[in-house]
Image (tube, grey):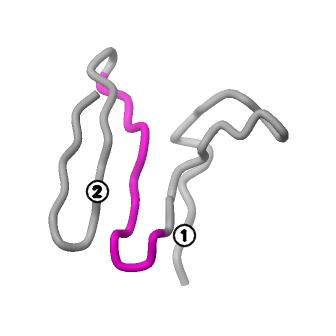
Amino acid sequence: MYTLENDTLRVVINSVGAELSSLINKRTGLEYLWNADPAFWPKKSPYYFLLSEG
């Protein structure tokens, strides 16, 4: 896993397949990608769970 960040965002990228694993707004703490909560759906698919703010 690789982490890139600036004052606003923190991005975590899986080194296998360069999959975007996390996208967090550091100012609000909001995670924009699905966290694979097993209570609902334990898998990840960042293209399906990108959220819109606003």
Residue 23 forms part of the magenta stretch: yes
Residue range of the region highlighted in magenta in the rendering: 18-29
Near mark 2 (Cα within 10 A), the count class, few <14, some 14-19 or many ≥20, is: some
Q: Residues within 10 Å of mark 1 (few under 14, many from 20)?
A: few
Pointer 2 residue: 10
Give me the C-alpha separation between circle 1 and circle 2: 16 Å
Would you say residue 7 sits in the magenta stretch?
no
Instruction: Point out the tag, 1 or 2, that comes first from the N-terminus.
Output: 2
What residue is rendered at 35% in x and 78% in y?
A: 27
Residue 25 place in picture, x, y as percent: 38, 68
Residue at 67% x, 27% y is: 43
Q: Residue at x 34, y 70 (%)?
A: 26
Q: Is residue 5 left or right of residue 50?
A: left
- Toward the viewer: 14 or 53? 14
Relative vertical location of residue 25 with respect to residue 37 in this rendering, above or below: below
The relative height of residue 4 versus residue 16 in the rendered view (above or below) is: below
Using the rendered view, name the quadrant where residue 16 is placed: top left
- Identified by mark 1, the residue type is Ser
Q: Which residue is mark 1?
A: 52
